[in-house]
Image (cartoon, helix red, strand yellow):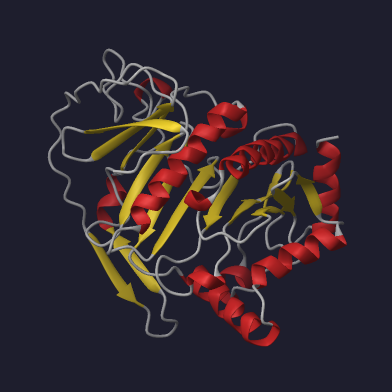
């Protein structure tokens, strides 16, 4: 078991044997976990991996997920703290950050799927967290990433958050997930191939050079601090897309220094609040951490977070049409420089 740098970790198990971990501020009293009284049967996930012979992509079939909980009313939320009449995945009256094995996992056997609850407050969003609360989530991400990377059945660790029904969220409680893939996802394979080509030609890291070019050019930068820069990428695919890069090349979240974790929490909250200020309500988004692979080509990776929204106007959604879905060729209605300027003005 890891010892998080800036948090107190408490491990326990749910009634069906799944792991549950609480993360509390380091200066809080020791947590005594309460028992999960639900008496759940042992999970029996049905997961099958197949490789597409045309592309080499691995496709996961997880048929048990078709019965997972779907948009329950707030008083029946399985991610809230347990209350009389509503025993939940977190068998305690309150919590700060909680991580548990997904009851309906996308991966099982090889790989692992976890749920990360950012707060016990059902009505909050990550945007509403204080910097200290956001910082505690970073500690949980770092701790879980390090532990999952050590598993022999894991090739890639992917912490992420989906927010908003438009994205496909099935539980409205503020939470994210961590997928520990037993293979390299297609996007990472593509990025690594480009990074390998760049390394051979330029002799330098592709991601570091992209960051340096954005910081030098300047027009697409949204915000920055001593250790991080947030910018709209030059060839953004999505209507609203911002990447957050640390100023030094790192493999994973666990490699961030204390100051870098502090600065990330500050900048990330800043960017999320700009997102919500764009149209005056909560913008649906996907927040996707990109770490280096666990074993292969680690030197080519560069830790960063990609934040994107499918909303192209206050009342319009960017749906993947024929070109995007059929050919993977994106056609955008928004220009990166214009999006960057708008997001800068939102925060001014």
Left-right relation of 93 to 186 = left
**x, y percentage for residue 137?**
49, 36
Quadrant where the C terminus is found in the figure: top right
- Front-lying residue, 299 or 182: 299
Total numbered circles: 0
Q: Residue at x 22, y 59 (%)?
A: 109
**x, y percentage for residue 140?**
44, 39
Q: Residue at x 62, y 57 (%)?
A: 319
Q: Residue at x 21, y 33 (%)?
A: 14
- Front-lying residue, 207 or 312: 207
The image quarter containing residue 276 is top right
The image quarter containing residue 61 is bottom left
The image quarter containing residue 111 is bottom left
Image vertical order of residue 39 relative to residue 67, above or below: above
Q: Residue furthest top?
A: 84
Image vertical order of residue 116 relative to residue 216, above or below: above
Q: Is residue 125 visible?
A: no
**x, y percentage for residue 51?**
34, 77
Q: Is residue 26 visible?
A: yes
Image vertical order of residue 170 relative to residue 310, above or below: above
Left-right relation of 264 to 66 = right
**x, y percentage for residue 180?**
36, 57
Quadrant where the N terminus is found in the figure: top left
Image vertical order of residue 131 relative to residue 43, above or below: above
């Amino acid at each position: 078991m890891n010892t998080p740098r800036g948090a107190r970790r408490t491990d326990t198990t749910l009634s069906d044997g799944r792991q549950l971990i609480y993360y509390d501020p380091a200066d809080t009293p020791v947590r005594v976990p309460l028992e999960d009284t639900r008496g759940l049967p042992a999970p029996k996930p049905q997961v099958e991996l197949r490789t597409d012979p045309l592309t080499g992509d691995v496709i996961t079939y997880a048929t048990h997920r078709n019965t997972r909980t779907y948009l329950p009313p707030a008083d029946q939320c399985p991610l809230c703290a347990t209350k009389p009449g509503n025993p939940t995945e977190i068998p305690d009256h309150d919590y700060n950050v909680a991580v548990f094995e997904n009851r309906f996992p996308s991966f099982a056997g090889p790989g692992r799927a976890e749920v990360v609850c950012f707060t016990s407050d059902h009505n909050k969003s990550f945007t509403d967290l204080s910097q200290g609360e956001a910082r505690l989530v970073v500690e949980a991400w770092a701790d879980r990433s390090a532990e999952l990377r050590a598993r022999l059945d894991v090739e890639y660790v992917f912490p992420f958050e989906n927010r908003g029904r438009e994205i496909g969220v099935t539980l409205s409680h503020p939470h994210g997930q961590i997928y520990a893939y037993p293979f390299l996802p297609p996007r990472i394979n593509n990025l690594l191939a480009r990074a390998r080509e760049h390394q051979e030609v330029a002799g330098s890291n592709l991601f570091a050079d992209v960051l340096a070019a954005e910081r030098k050019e300047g027009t697409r930068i949204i915000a920055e601090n001593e250790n991080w820069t947030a910018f709209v990428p030059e060839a953004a695919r999505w209507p609203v897309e911002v990447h957050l890069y640390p100023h030094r090349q790192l493999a994973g979240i666990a490699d961030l220094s204390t100051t870098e974790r502090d600065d990330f929490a500050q900048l990330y909250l800043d960017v999320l609040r700009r997102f919500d200020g764009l149209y005056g309500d909560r913008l649906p988004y996907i927040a996707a951490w990109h770490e280096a692979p666990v074993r292969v080509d680690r030197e080519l990776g560069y830790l960063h977070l990609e934040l994107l929204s499918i909303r192209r106007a206050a009342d319009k959604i960017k749906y993947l049409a024929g070109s995007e879905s059929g050919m993977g060729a994106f056609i955008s209605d928004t220009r990166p420089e214009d999006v960057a300027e708008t997001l800068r003005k939102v925060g001014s």
